[in-house]
Image (spheres, grey):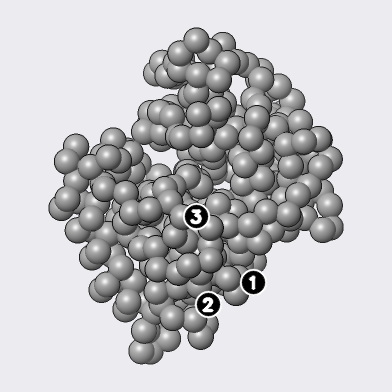
Amino acid sequence: MLVPLAPAQGAATLRGVVAGSPIVALLDSGVRVTQEEFAYAGPHAANDQVVAWWDFTANKKPVAVLPKPGQTWDPAVPTPYDDEGHGTGTASMAVGLDRTTDKTPSGAPGYRLAIGKVSGNSGAAQNLAGAIGWAVHTVHASVISISIGTITPDPSTLSADVLDAFDDAWRSGVLVVVANGNGWGNVGVVPGEPGWATGFGESTHVLAVGASDEQGVLETTDPEVTALSDVHAASNTADDAYVDEGGTSFAAPFVAGLAARAIAAGRAAHRDVSPAHIRQLLEYSALDTVRPPQSEGYGSLSLDQLPAALRYARAGTLPARPDPDVTGWYVENVAMPLRALWSNTLRVG
């Protein structure tokens, strides 16, 4: 039986939690849920920010165990954890409560969070396709944030199960937001890594996010949008600890938070909140800069663009783009066809 994900009528909510908000599913290394950036009351709380949790790794189990239909909470590992720290930081950029003034603001403070731990001691992602299916069909997330990739172009045949899961999420009405890479060898010092052939930014059914910082030209190519990647985010080392982080891993969950807020606004006004529309709304809302389209896609997103984006979400319309729209033209006529060739035509799955 599916565990209720929304608070009961009249139930008190923890401070900062946006009750009934769209759910953001974070598939990463887990989350230190006792960190002050999150409002966590335990696995049986009906008014919690954390509405679902599953450990898809074999870190604490003899073998990895996938959830059965309807299972939103892992009975074998009932307390969410993060032994790497990456997921705590990315989650704080998506839905963190921004408890301190020096923390980089999140995209959707207090929005509900589902946690799928898909990376652990082995380093590589484990059961990512299964975690995506869980987030879509059991958790009923509105947005999925994934900051996992590869350091060199990855043949799509090796990721066919994940690409199939992206397609299923898209058809099911769930927007997947992915980090678009950090340069050749994941070192962010040599440009040219093709975002359409690397990690999971290669799918045509995701929103691929690059870096809007100055070094973004060295981190990623062919994203659809960019956002701030050098951030001060929550750390897994203590409940009140923060750390400076960098990379598109932290830009992507911020944009996932913006997407969740746009979905909430559109849903409240009974407008189109399909993945295609929300992706296009965020693309069109991005600020076009002097950077080449290979580096920034449509442009950069920040909290400055959010108020207008929410107005358009409520109206069910899209912002106007520059005319001519060089960056938009590049994404749609160069980057996306390359993604389609790489992830669809060459895929065997």
* Drawn side of residue 116 relative to residue 229, left or right: left
Q: Which residue is mark 1?
A: 304
Q: State the image coordinates of residue 63 (x, y, percent, origin top left).
A: 46, 13
Q: Earlier in the sequence, mark 1 or mark 2?
A: 2
- Which residue is more in the foreground, 87 or 181? 181
> For the residue marked with disc 3, what is the amino acid?
Asn
The amino acid on which the numbered mark 2 sits, given as a three-letter code, is Leu
**Neighbour tally class for label 2: few under 14, some 14-19, many 20 plus, Cα within 10 Å:** some
Query: Is the C terminus in the top left, top right, bottom left or bottom right quadrant?
Result: top left
Residue 74: image location, x then y, percent? 55, 17
Q: Which residue is mark 2?
A: 287
Residue 67, placed above or below residue 23: above
Nearest to viewer (mark 3 / mark 1)? 3
- Say which label, 3 or 1, has the lower sequence index: 3
Residue 51, by quadrant, is: top right
Please report contact status of discs 1 and 2: CB closer than 8 Å, yes or no: yes
Q: Secondary structure at mark 2?
A: loop
Location of mark 3 (residue): 186
Q: Nearer the viewer, residue 150 or 232?
A: 150
Q: Identify the secondary structure beneath mark 3.
A: helix
For marks 1 and 2, give the CA distance: 10 Å
User: Quick one: label 1, few (<14), some, or many (20+) residues within 10 Å?
Assistant: few
Residue type for callout 1: Asp
Alpha-carbon distance for marks 3 and 1?
A: 29 Å
What's the CA distance linking mark 3 and mark 2?
26 Å
Q: Position of residue 301 (x, y in %)?
A: 56, 68
Relative horizontal placement of residue 209, taking residue 156 as reference (left or right): right
